[in-house]
Structures are given as C-alpha cells and as structure tokens.
Image (spheres, rainbow, N blue to C red):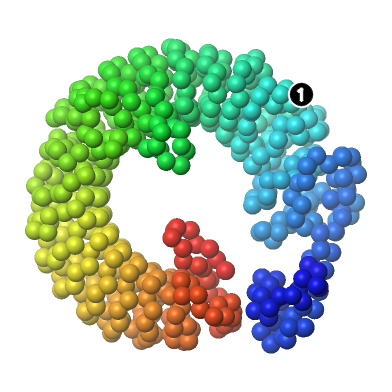
Amino acid sequence: MKKEILNNKTYEELRKIASKKKIEGRSKMKKSELIKAILKESKKKKSQKGSGLYNTIKNKTGKIIGSLLPRLPYRNLPEGEPGYYNEFTGEFINFNNLPKNNSSKTIQPNNIKEENNVRKIKIINELPSNVTRFITNFLPVENLHTLKNTSTKFNIGLVLDRQKIFSNNDLNFLNSSLNNLNKKKKNIINKLSIDGNNIDINKLQRLYQYFDVNEIVWNSTDEILKDSLPINLKSLELLNYQNPLLPGVLPINLKIIEIKYINDLYNFSRNNLDSYDLLQPNILPNSLETLIIVNYNKIIGKNVLPQSLKTLELTNYNLEQETNLESGVLPENLKSLTIHDYKRLGKIKIKNDSLPKSLVSFDYSGTSDFDLAVLPRFLKELTLDLHGRIESFRDLTHLTLLETLIIYDDINSDINFEELPNSIISLKLNGYNNIIKPNTLPPLLKILKMNRFNQPIGLDELPHSIRNLELNYYNNIIKPNTLPPLLKILKMNSFNQPIGKNVLPKTLKILDIRNFTGLIDINNMPADLEVLMMSPRNKDNLINNLPKKLKELGIKNNYRINNFGDFIEEIKNKYPELKIFLVTISSEKKYI
C-alpha cells in the first residue's frame, strides 16, 4: 500500500485499515502515526511471502501456467523444502516433518483459493513417501500432465472434489495425464460435470479406469449410452436432458438421480422447459434410493419407480390435466415423499389408497381441497401448504405417531389445538395470530415456531416442555414467569419491549432479540446465557451488562452507529474471550 494513497484517506478510514491489520495501540495513534504503522505492517507482510517454495516452483517447472494463489504467503523455506503456509487458517505444513511411520497420512489444504494449480502440482510432486492421499478442490486438466509418475516414486491417491469437461480437448488433456497417476491407488473425483457435446465415450471410459467418480452432472445434449457412465457411479444429475434412456443404461449401483428441466436456474417456476418422458418401465435401477424431479410434466405410471426407492421429491410437478395418483404407483417401502404442485393448481389428486403405508415423511404443497384423512397413520413428519385456510385439526387425530408438524397456511382463530396429536414435539405455524388457550398445545412439545404470532402470552399458555421458542413478529410486553421455565433458545426478531425481572428463564442459553434497542439490566439476564444477538444502539449499556458466561455476541448494525470499529474494539478489550459476529439475514455467522 503506497503512502500517497494513505495520505488521502480520512482518519476513520485509516483506523479501519489498522484494525484489519491488527495494529496494536492504534486507538491512541495520530494520523501520521497510523500511516507509518500501516506501511510498516504492509512491508512486514510482503517480506513474509518470501521466495523459497515459490521460486523453487518457478525454477523447476519453468513457465508458470496461470497465477495460482498469488496472495498465499509462503514462509522463507530452504531451497527445495516442500511445504506451504495457509494465510486463512494460519496453518503451516512442512511435508518433510510429517511422521515417517504414518502410512495413511492425508494432506488436505483447506480454504486455499483455487487459483494456483501449478503450485498444487508442485506440492503433490514433492510429497514424501508416507503421504498416501492428496485432497484438493479443483485442478484444470491441462495441468495434470505435470504430475510425476506417482506409481513408481509415490504411493499417492489423488482426490479432486470437482472437475469439469467442456470438450474432447479436456478429455485429451486428461488422457495424456492418466499415466502419471497410480492406477492401483484409489483416485477419486467427487463431482464430475460433463457440459460439452459430442464427447468421446472411449476417452470417458479410460478416465473411469483411473478415477472412481461419485457424482456426475450431465449437462450435455449427448444421449447417455451404456458406456457413458461409470459402473460404480452413486449419484447422477440430468439437467434439461431431452434424450431417451434405454433399459440397462444407468449403472446398477446408482443411489441418487436428480432430473431438472430449467431455463432460469434462479427461478424454477419461470420459463420451464417441456420435460422429456424419461420415466418408463425398466429404466431406473433397482438400487435407486432417492429420486428428485424438478419441473416434470409427465404422468408417472405403474412399474416405473423401483421398490428400492426410499425418497421421492416432485418439485413444481406441472401436469397438463387433472390426474389421480393411482394406487401402486408409489413403491411399497417409500419413506419420504414431497409433492409441490405447480402453482398449486391441484392437478394431481391424492386418493385414499394413493400413499403407501410405509410413509413416515410427507411434504405437500397444493390445493385446499386436499383430504387430510387420507394421510398414512404412521407419519412422523408432515408439512402442509394448501393455499387456503386450516379450519380444524380434526382430520389429523389419527396420526398418533406424528412428531413434526409444519403448516404454512392461515389458521382459523377458533381452532382447537387439543385436536392435535399428543405425540407432536415440533410445531411450526406460519399463519396463526390469536390467543392460545392454556393447556391446549401438545404436552410433549419441545420446539414451537410461530411466524406471525403477536398476542400477549398468559400463564400456562405455553407448555413447560418447550426448549426452543421462535416468535419472529412478536412485540408485546412479556410478563414474569410466562415463558416456559426450561427454555434454552428464544428468538424474537421484532421484539423491542422492556425486559423485566423473571421474564427470561434462568435456563436460557441462546437469546436472539436482534432488533432490541432498549436498555438491558445484567440482573435480568440469565447468568448462564452463552449467545446473545441484539442491536448496539445503546452501546454503553450493552458493554456494561453482558453476562459473564457469554461466549458469543451477535451485533446487528442496522443503525450505522458512529465509530462502529471502536465499539467492537472496546468490547474485545473488555471481554477478550468473547466471539463477535455480525447478524445477517442468513443463518451464517460472520465473525469479526
């Protein structure tokens, strides 16, 4: 970073740069001192990149193909000493120092940017004999030919997480590289994408001789022939496939098939392609356990689905006319069924004998005239989106083993919760917003999620058995001792009311009140709270009232408070063991 650039930055911008570089004492520095410290730190980092392994690679391989991991700082290693330093994990591996007696050592450079493939090849070529497996995400096929002959010098199996073939040129590169691999060792490609057309089947077959391929994505106009796929393939995805499948073509050990007809990859319901009538008798192998179909518009007949099938998902099932799901179409041993009727038009009709008795999980999105009484009595998980209003739970009383119930529809305000099966332990009601009568919810309930609920909570309205409570739109004052006494997780994204004494249970471990802007009192917070998410609007109050056992603090900076970096730094100084993350829409935590 040049001095001229730093001179043009504001003091606050320099403070942020210094914070990222973790420069000590930055909060007390003047602008000129910050610039000197930043320049010094940048020079230090630059020198750490060194020249050892990088120059070794460059000298021995000659011209470097591409620019692999240009920002990966290598330690200053003795010339020729194999090793690398991962700037993202802080991990340094010196291959020469690996234990000599470990015959099954695996090297997996996690979190390294997948750019410098030449250096990866260099690392593979310099692995000592005790390393038997090298795992990496991606290696372009044009680089594989630089691998040494591992069958004579090394005992290495190469694992590629993903690999793409766009043309026969890619296959030519691969085939010229295969002699450098140890055929006796287990080389693996976890996911192979075939995106090109007119692919040479013979060259594909040679690739399969050297690599076990776990999953193939077939995004080619080529017809799949008997030798197009490896015999031990476990998973196959057909994307917009418009060719027939003949009996005996699919591998006999295939476990998972996904069939997708999509024009818009980001909106499955837009510009759907007309699906090819793939599902004919004797096409799917008897080993198949999972079948996922997106935007299919053909009727599935009898003797099409193998009896081995355990999971069937029909997303945006887009039939042209109303069709009954006939008895015997679904396998007798089917465990999980998902039917999402296209635009909820109700074209597929489920009758009394349509669903197998073996079903334990059913996810249905369709029309409001669906008869709940036809549901198999052994169901344990049920998800309903009927595009209407649930008037009664009476038709669910026969589901005496039901454990999880999710309903996305509006629910009658006078509905009787006592009609729900007592076996339910997890309940999600997206459209209920009315008073809950005391002692009416299932007595064994552990998880309760109500998205729109915003009514005052009274005594004994919520079962004492609840451990996880999510009320996304709740913003009422909570009276003392009304929340379940053994509650461990409480999420109220819209809550912004005062928190009094004895409101929060002592057992609480996770509290998500991300939009709360009021004052908190440490005496009213559970002493054993481990994770807290809230707004930092009253930052001074927050800093001085955090529970002592708190492990993580989630901050939603939607108010764009001034000196946010200083605020975070102050928390870190006072609570050095505390992890801090930004609260986002996604569930992923972004630690800072």
Residue position for label 1 = 176
Q: Is residue 522 above or below residue 188?
A: below
Q: Residue at x 36, y 15 (%)?
A: 280
Query: What amino acid type is highlighted by mark number 1?
Result: Ser
Q: Based on the displayed image, in which of its 4 quarters is residue 522 positioned?
A: bottom left
User: Can residue 292 be seen?
Assistant: no
Position above or below: 373 against 441: above
The C terminus - image quarter: bottom right
Q: Nearer the viewer, residue 441 or 493?
A: 493
Would residue 227 appear left or right of 176 to someone viewing this image?
left
| Residue 192 in view, yes or no | yes
Q: Is residue 248 left or right of residue 167?
A: left
Using the image, determine if residue 27 lies above or below residue 338: below
Q: Quadrant of the N terminus?
A: bottom right
Q: Position of residue 338 (x, y in %)?
A: 30, 36
Q: Is residue 33 above or below residue 246?
A: below
Residue 258, percent across and down?
Answer: 43, 30
